[in-house]
Image (tube, helix red, strand yellow):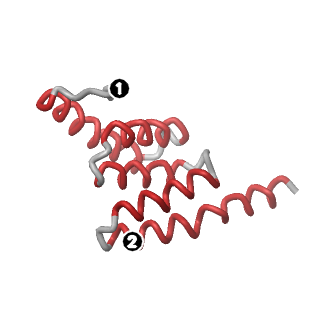
Amino acid sequence: AGACTSYRHTEKAAPQLSFGTNVAKKGLWREAAFRYEQAVAKEPNNARAHNNLAVALEANGDFAHALSEYKRALELEPNNNYIRRNYARFAEFYTSYTKTTGKAAGGP
């Protein structure tokens, strides 16, 4: 029964993730972020949802929030190379950004 519950739980975030990805491809990053937030709310331990939310937040310029989402995705799946690359790329950008602008909100 536990596996079935887990499976149903996973299915709850899938439509939001899919919708978010479709609108992100069209450049509708605010809508994508909203959809990914919905996916995270339905599945707080879904690393893909956190990663996708981080990407959308980054695209919207919400870098501090993006950083926390990248970190959460990495905590959930530390061996996921896709998430690791996204985080590393963002951390490099964010470090440079905070040095240039003087804006820091919890460095990488």
- Element type at marker 1? loop
| Side (left or right) of 89 relative to 77 | left
Residue 4: image location, x then y, percent? 81, 61
Would you call the spot at circle 2 few (<14 residues within 10 Å), some (14-19), or many (20 or more)? some
Q: Which residue is mark 2?
A: 23
Q: What residue do we see at 74% from left, 63% from top?
A: 8
Picture quarter with the N terminus: bottom right
| For marks 1 and 2 on the same chain, the one whose residue lies earlier in the sequence | 2
- Up the image or down, 5 lies above or below 15; here it is above
Residue 88: image location, x then y, percent? 30, 39
At label 2, which amino acid type do we have?
Val
Decide which of 70, 32 is in the foreground and name it: 32
Residue 54: image location, x then y, percent? 39, 48
Residue 101: image location, x then y, percent? 14, 31
| Side (left or right) of 96 relative to 9 | left
Q: Kindly indicate the quadrant of the structure image that contains residue 90.
A: top left
Would you call the spot at circle 1 few (<14 residues within 10 Å), some (14-19), or many (20 or more)? few
Alpha-carbon distance for marks 1 and 2? 29 Å
Q: Kindly indicate the quadrant of the structure image that contains residue 106.
A: top left
Q: What residue do we see at 67% from left, 65% from top?
A: 11
Q: Which residue is mark 1?
A: 106
Q: Kindly indicate the quadrant of the structure image that contains residue 62.
A: top left
- Element type at marker 2? helix
- Up the image or down, 47 lies above or below 14; here it is above
